[in-house]
């Protein structure tokens, strides 16, 4: 008595609209997991807390990163995540800089004339405004000690 006859056009239109809405919900679900900024910050903290020169790498499950002296941000299709460092500040190195070469293995004595020039490069990179940059590789962290100056360099 209260049933809708299945040959009525409005029941098929309603069923089509419900199916379309269900498809829209399923299509909007992200296909990847959100990035894990806490794991990245923990890797940086392990290197920063060490008393000796140390290097570590961490794979990034993100398409963009924002490195700052006190925080890291990761972004991918599933969202954005941020985490703070427990040991900081760290120095995010700028691309094609002498500090980037130090991070990837060159001794500071090959690139800097004095402790003061090394310290000026560290301060310049540390005070630069963090910005989102695309990333397709791993995060690299290195603790460097040179002429009494201890620095944690970070790049992705």
Image (cartoon, helix red, strand yellow):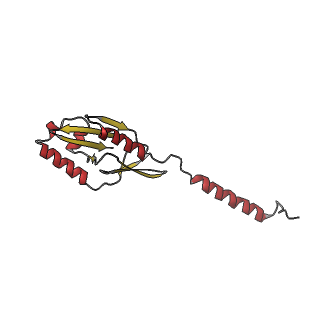
Can residue 126 be seen here? The reply is: yes
For the residue pair 11 and 44, the one nearer the viewer reads as 44
For the residue pair 2 and 37, the one nearer the viewer reads as 37
Q: Quadrant of the N terminus?
A: bottom right
Residue 127 horizontal side relative to residue 40, left or right? left
Q: Position of residue 154 (x, y in %)?
A: 30, 43
| Relative height, residue 22 to residue 9 (above, below) | above
Q: Residue at x 26, y 42 (%)?
A: 152
Residue 8 horizontal side relative to residue 138, left or right? right
For the residue pair 125 and 148, the one nearer the viewer reads as 148
Q: Quadrant of the C terminus?
A: top left
Q: Position of residue 80 (x, y in %)?
A: 44, 53
Q: Position of residue 126 (x, y in %)?
A: 25, 51
Instruction: Count numbered badges in the picture.
Output: 0
Q: Position of residue 60 (x, y in %)?
A: 40, 42
Residue 32 horizontal side relative to residue 101, left or right? right
Q: Residue at x 33, y 36 (%)?
A: 56
């Amino acid at each position: 008595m209260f049933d809708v006859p299945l040959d009525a056009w409005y029941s098929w239109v309603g069923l089509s609209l419900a199916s379309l809405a269900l498809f829209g919900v399923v299509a909007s679900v992200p296909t990847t997991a959100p990035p894990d900024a806490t794991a990245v910050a923990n890797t940086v903290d392990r290197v920063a807390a060490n008393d000796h020169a140390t290097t570590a790498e961490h794979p990034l499950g993100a398409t963009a990163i924002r490195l700052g002296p006190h925080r890291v941000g990761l972004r991918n299709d599933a969202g954005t995540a941020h985490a703070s460092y427990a040991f900081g500040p760290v120095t995010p190195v700028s691309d094609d800089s002498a500090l980037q070469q130090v991070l990837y293995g060159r001794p500071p004595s090959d690139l800097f004339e004095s402790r003061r020039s090394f310290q000026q490069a560290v301060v310049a990179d540390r005070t630069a405004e963090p910005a989102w940059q695309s990333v397709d590789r791993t995060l690299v962290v290195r603790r460097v000690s040179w002429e009494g100056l201890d620095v944690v360099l970070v790049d992705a």
